Amino acid sequence: MTKKSKLITRLLSCPKDFSYDEAKTLLGHFGFTENNKGRMSGSRVEFIKDNDTILLHKPHPTAELKTYQVKQLIEVLKSLNYI
């Protein structure tokens, strides 16, 4: 199993400890690039590939995404036919 397929499998299991770095790595495998939306963006991060955009909130103080964020990421990746 490749790292990409392991991350997809892990994401689809909706773990409570799925980290922002794992999401960033997975989106990088799909060709998305991270874009902080300017100096005043705070923890909002945009991932862009062609005309596709995925918005995430960079978690703090912990590195784990909230459960609703993991579910939203799954929905978006499915709707864009990446998984």
Image (spheres, grey):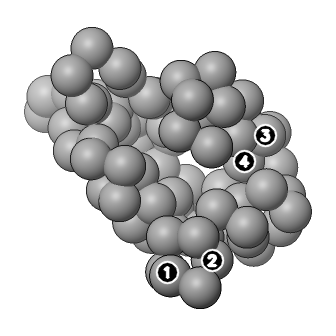
> Mark 1 = which residue?
3
Q: Which mark is residue 6?
A: 2
Q: Is residue 18 visible?
A: yes
C-alpha gap between disc 2 and disc 4: 15 Å
Residue nearest the viewer, comparing 52 with 63: 52
C-alpha gap between disc 1 and disc 4: 18 Å
C-alpha gap between disc 2 and disc 1: 5 Å
Question: Which of the two labelled residues, at mark 1 and mark 4, occupies the earlier sequence position?
Answer: 1
**Is residue 23 placed above or below 40 in the rendered structure?**
below
> Mark 3 = which residue?
71
C-alpha gap between disc 1 and disc 3: 20 Å
Q: Residues within 10 Å of mark 3 (few under 14, many from 20)?
A: some
> Mark 4 = which residue?
70
Q: Residues within 10 Å of mark 4 (few under 14, many from 20)?
A: many
Give the structural element (helix, strand or loop) at label 1. helix
Q: Which mark is residue 40?
A: none
Give the structural element (helix, strand or loop) at label 3. helix
Give the structural element (helix, strand or loop) at label 4. helix
**Is residue 53 placed above or below 49 in the rendered structure?**
above
